Amino acid sequence: MEIEKNIYKIVLPLPFKLDSINCYLLRGEDGWDIIDTGLNYPSARDVWENFFQNGLVALNDIRAIYLTHYHPDHYGMAGWLQNLTGAPVYIHRSESSQVEQLWKKGRLNFPLVGDLFSEHGMPAAMSVEVVDNMSGILTHVQPHPILSYLNGGEEIEMGCRRFRVLHTPGHSIGHMCFFCEEEGILISGDHILPTITSNISLWPTSHPNPLELFLTSLEMTGCLPIGKVLPAHGNVFTDCAARADQLIEHHRTRLALITDMAGSGTSAYDICVKVFGDDLSLHELRFAMAETLAHLAYLESRGRVVSRRDGGIIVYKSGSLQVSRGQGGRSCP
Ligand SMILES: [Zn+2]
Ligand SMILES: [Zn+2]
């Protein structure tokens, strides 16, 4: 579907609660560029194969493939598409270690997630189940592409437009958005989505304070002259600044809630259950726990909670430094 002149959206299925991802194809005079690729499994491959069979684009028309970040729904089919098209695959330089540690050495590193969750109070048997549940993803991110790297700040031609590469860390350490200043178009990946909040997670392999990075990136994005956002999940939307403010407020509210829940000494797991409930799938529980840890890491960095070990489990309690909600709004230069 052509959603802007020379920009096509392909919706690929995902076998999760979040059931689809938007990939974008941009048409230029001497070829096409792809942004994000989908998870590698039969239903999604069918969509790409049908697209290439309809005659609009030939495989050798593909000039380059760009990945907004390393997550499996974005990276998963990059190698498969590279093998078909011969196109280079670009990702932010700081995603390379995530690809290496998680997608190439996942069997070694996934157990670290279980260790992290256990020391934050998750029952040991449940941590083992969470880790077992992760390994299924590895078959859906292969074959691996040969990666080329961007640093953020580059001006690149995609399709027939010029885009600035924006490094927007938070949802992942090397998340990138693509901004066409001339037309006010932002291709936002998972950085800013219209109806759901992007997961902000602390993992053993992630940045130690991803929420801090995310809020800073959102403030930056909210200040840009953006007229239209093309997200990786959900529909095109227009008021980017208002959505950025909404998301910042959402996290402020949750930070205040978690500070209160920490009280005089509570584990991250107990806080996670209070915030997200105890009726989650293993997949949902993993992200709920990692999101809780990201909020606690932010709060601890600000002195709003303090942690200590109590019988092998890390517990948090509200710190002396309290910050009133709403303090420090977005200020654009
Ligand atoms: Zn993502
Ligand atoms: Zn995604």
Image: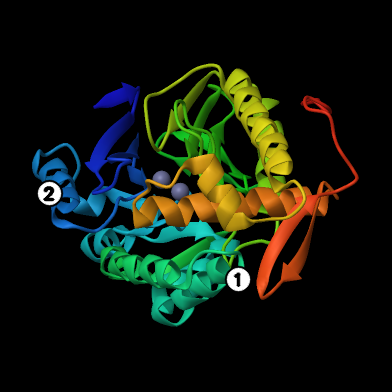
Q: Dot 1: what SS?
A: helix
Q: State left or right for residue 215 relative to residue 184.
A: right
Q: Which residue is mark 2?
A: 46
For residue 258, above or below residue 181: below
Residue 297: x and y, percent?
71, 55
Residue for badge 1? 119
- Image color mode: rainbow
Q: Position of residue 282 (x, y in %)?
A: 36, 57
Tell me the mark number nearer the camera, choosing from 1 and 2: 1
**Is residue 262 shown to the viewer in this render?**
yes
Tell me the SS state at disc 2: helix
The quadrant of the rendering that contains the C terminus is top right
Which residue is painted at 83% across and 48% down in the image? 302
Q: Foreground: 184 or 284?
A: 284
Q: Quadrant of ligand 2?
A: top left
State the residue at coordinates (26%, 36%): 10
Taking the image as shown, residue 217 lies to the left or right of residue 31, namely right
